[in-house]
């Protein structure tokens, strides 16, 4: 495929943009898809970008949305110019304006629903675009800006930002060489949780045709729980949790208030339950309108059955958190017992884990139950729900372990992202793969990138569909292979569990007091 040779200019619905040529790709950065959500638009749904005259240079990423500084990872650079134009898209195309109409891959970043930005080396779309796709990334609001639930404010603003970005893709991507009738959304962690929500949202219907959900979190909130979190954020500012009171608050002050709540979130365990113990104060809210019901319920009943889906996870999801906190190999029996009591499914869950994994030491046991609760079982259940609802479904597990740090990370959370993008240096890639990624990493990356782009092109990633009778699953290892779902012990333990909206609770903590 012959790439462009000069700075390309493309006419969008708001005006003309001029990109740059980099590594044979036409690259456009920082194109606004909505107006800055500040001033009279603070805490409002996204509003389409204002048109401009002349040619707008699209060479720099848009500024990072306000996001947690207390989470310990992921916070992006503040805009040196102080710009509030957070809602921007970026496009990589091997053939802008071409007649081929290439498949489109739209990335939704993760970050615990509290951090995230589309810039940085990990999300560079060059390698995927080189496989014959048009790649789109974009910024959306996170934390209290995107998910804070306040009286009078439209809920799930982050999800509505994503819908607005997908509407921009629908209306503009043909000019960049993409096919608006072959749009695949793909995302990881909170991004996969957002994709699960988009599959259940009437507002998103028809905006994408395929979806890849990598490490889906199982947390969606009831309005009561989300409102209680919102009230706690507002209380840090001495204000009521209403749109009228909070809209005048500077976004960074609202962010700081949310960080203050995060800093003492364990104190809310009696009211917020598992989200307090997992340090997850924000998630999509099942508000009944923007998000009518939980994604698992929606897919079980056949919603989005016409959207082809890949859903999967990494084998050792929670290993990242124990290693990065310096706790790997140091979890005590008491800590593991506490985690089991809180997060295992149902009253029989604790005994089931001990019987199912008799050789697991305390660290391994904690990692198992947290991997299952956070990502493995929600991802599996999303695949099962979609298959039960009549949708074409594919499942996978990343089982190849990262070699850096003596192999301690294993197939940890986030490892799939640089492998899929083909960006094996920088960020988590360098942490997990080292300064010189081994040939095995290149091979696994090639297998995943080829599968994702093949799926985006024609709906077949190269392995058998997932069905609830045989549960065939692609395992990405040094030699990729397809087998019945490999985490059968956990699957059986969680088979009767329902991932539903988490409720405000006054229940006693299941962990016995000392």
Image: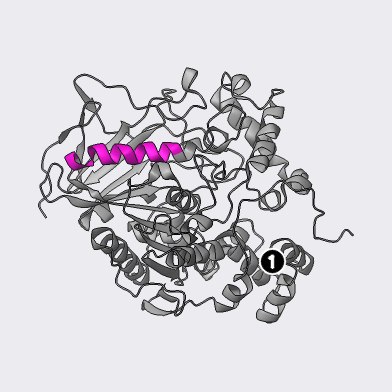
Q: Which of 471 and 206 is in front in this view?
A: 206
Q: Can residue 343 be seen in this view?
A: yes
Count residues near mark 1 (Cα–Cα under 10 Å), then give few for <14, some for 14-19, many for 20+: many
Instruction: Tell me: residue 158, above or below residue 34.
Output: below
Q: What stretch is highlighted in magenta?
A: 160-175
The answer to which image quadrant residue 212 occupies is: bottom left
Q: Is residue 476 visible?
A: no
Label 1 secondary element? loop
Q: Which of 497 and 380 is in front in this view?
A: 497
Q: Is residue 11 left or right of residue 321?
A: left
Residue 95 in picture, x, y percent from top left: 14, 47
Residue 324 is one of the magenta-drawn residues: no
* Picture residue at 49% right of the left edge, 67% below the top: 411
* Picture residue at 63% right of the left edge, 43% below the top: 281
Which SS type dominates the magenta stretch? helix
The answer to which image quadrant residue 172 occupies is: top left
Quadrant containing the N terminus in the rendered view: bottom left
* Picture residue at 72% right of the left edge, 63% below the top: 339
- Furthest-right residue in view? 514
Q: Nearer the viewer, residue 212 or 371?
A: 212
Quadrant containing the C terminus in the rendered view: bottom right
Q: Nearer the viewer, residue 98 or 23?
A: 98
Instruction: Tell me: residue 425, above or below residue 454.
Output: above
- Furthest-front residue in view? 301
Residue 512 in picture, x, y percent from top left: 85, 61
Q: In this view, does 221 lie to the left or right of 124?
A: right
Instruction: Tell me: residue 370, above or below residue 505.
Output: below
Q: In this view, does 204 lie to the left or right of 3?
A: right
Residue 470 in picture, x, y percent from top left: 44, 80
Q: Mark 1 points at which residue?
A: 344
């Amino acid at each position: 495929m012959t790439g462009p040779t000069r700075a390309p200019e493309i006419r969008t619905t708001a005006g003309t943009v001029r990109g740059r040529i980099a590594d044979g790709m036409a690259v456009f950065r920082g194109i606004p898809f909505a107006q800055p959500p500040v001033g009279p638009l603070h805490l409002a749904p996204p509003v389409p970008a204002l048109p401009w005259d002349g040619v707008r240079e699209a060479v720099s990423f848009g500024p990072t949305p306000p996001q947690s500084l207390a989470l310990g990872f992921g916070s992006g650079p503040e805009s040196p110019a102080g710009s509030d134009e957070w809602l921007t898209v970026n496009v990589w195309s091997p053939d802008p304006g071409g007649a081929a109409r290439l498949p489109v891959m739209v990335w939704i970043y993760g970050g615990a629903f509290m951090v995230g930005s589309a810039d940085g080396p990990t999300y560079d779309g060059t390698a995927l675009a080189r496989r014959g796709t048009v790649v789109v990334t974009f910024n959306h609001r996170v934390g209290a800006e995107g998910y804070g639930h306040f009286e009078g404010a439209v809920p799930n603003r982050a999800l509505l930002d994503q819908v607005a970005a997908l509407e921009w893709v629908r209306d503009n991507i043909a000019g960049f060489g993409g096919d608006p009738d072959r749009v695949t959304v793909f995302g990881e962690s909170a991004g996969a949780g957002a994709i699960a929500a988009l599959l259940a949202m009437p507002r998103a219907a028809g905006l994408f045709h395929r979806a890849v959900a990598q490490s889906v979190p199982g947390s969606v909130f009831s309005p009561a729980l989300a409102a209680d979190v919102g009230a706690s954020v507002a209380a840090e500012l001495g204000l009521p949790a209403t749109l009228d009171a909070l809209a005048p608050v500077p976004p960074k002050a609202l962010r700081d208030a949310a960080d203050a709540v995060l800093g003492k979130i364990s104190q809310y365990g009696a009211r917020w339950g598992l989200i307090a113990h997992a340090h997850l104060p924000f998630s999509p809210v099942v508000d009944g309108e923007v998000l009518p019901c939980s994604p698992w319920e929606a897919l079980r009943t056949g919603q989005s059955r016409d959207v082809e889906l890949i859903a999967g996870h990494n084998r050792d999801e929670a290993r990242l958190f124990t290693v990065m906190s310096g706790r790997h190999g140091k979890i005590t029996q008491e800590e593991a017992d506490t985690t089991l009591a809180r997060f295992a499914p149902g009253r029989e869950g604790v005994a089931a884990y001990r019987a199912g994994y008799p050789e697991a030491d305390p660290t391994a046991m904690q990692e198992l139950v947290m991997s299952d609760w956070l990502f493995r079982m929600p991802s599996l259940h999303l695949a099962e729900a979609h298959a039960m609802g009549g949708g074409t479904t594919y499942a996978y597990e990343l089982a190849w372990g990262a070699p850096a740090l003596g192999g301690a990370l294993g197939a940890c959370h986030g490892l799939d992202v640089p492998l899929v993008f083909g960006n094996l240096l920088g960020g988590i890639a360098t942490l997990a793969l080292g300064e010189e990624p081994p040939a095995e990493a290149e091979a696994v990356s090639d297998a995943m990138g080829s599968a994702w782009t093949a799926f985006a092109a024609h709906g077949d990633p190269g392995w058998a569909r997932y069905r609830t009778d045989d549960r065939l699953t692609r395992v990405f290892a040094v030699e990729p292979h397809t087998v019945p779902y490999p985490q059968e012990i956990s699957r059986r333990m969680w088979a009767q569990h329902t991932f539903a909206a988490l409720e405000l609770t006054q229940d006693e903590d299941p962990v016995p007091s000392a």
